[in-house]
Image (tube, rainbow, N blue to C red):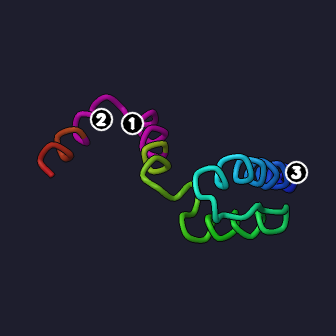
């Protein structure tokens, strides 16, 4: 399933690139499927996925739901003092 998602993502990237980039930057060539895969991998290496600020917020929300009301108040106080 994951492989299918990546295959579709590569195809979408290729189609978007070929539709948008040559119009914005006339010297930009068109991408074939394998170059789109390479570009997607480079972006993945450079920018990652799921390790940014938003994923940490999600973890905090999950943790927040497990706290008692007293623990929440203590955490709020610690965060305000920090």
Residue for badge 1: 67
Q: Residues within 10 Å of mark 3 (few under 14, many from 20)?
A: few
Q: Nearer the viewer, residue 51 or 81?
A: 51
Q: Earlier in the sequence, mark 3 or mark 1?
A: 3
| Corner quadrant of residue 22 | bottom right
Left or right relative to 3: residue 60? left
Counting other residues with Cα less than 10 Å from the Cα at mark 2, is it few (<14), some (14-19), or many (20 or more)?
Answer: some
Cβ–Cβ below 8 Å for labels 2 and 1? yes
- Looking at the picture, does residue 38 appear above or below residue 4? below
Q: Using a 10 Å C-alpha cutoff, classify the residue at mark 1 as few (fewer than 14 neighbours), some (14 to 19) or many (20 or more).
A: few
User: Would residue 68 be counted in the magenta stretch?
Assistant: yes
- Where disc 1 sits, the SS reads loop
Q: Which numbered mark, 3 or 1, is in the foreground of this view? A: 3
Residue pointed to by mark 3: 4
Q: Is residue 42 above or below residue 11?
A: below
Q: Residue at x 30, y 38 (%)?
A: 71
Alpha-carbon span between mark 2 and mark 1: 6 Å
Q: Which residue is denoted by mark 2 in the rendering?
A: 72
């Amino acid at each position: 399933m994951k492989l299918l998602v990546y295959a579709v993502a590569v195809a979408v990237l290729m189609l978007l690139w070929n539709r948008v980039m040559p119009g914005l930057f006339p010297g930009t060539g068109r991408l074939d499927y394998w170059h789109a895969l390479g570009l997607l991998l480079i972006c993945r290496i450079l920018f990652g996925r799921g390790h940014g600020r938003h994923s940490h917020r999600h973890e905090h929300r999950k943790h927040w739901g497990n706290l008692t009301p007293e623990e929440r108040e203590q955490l709020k106080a610690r965060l305000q003092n920090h």
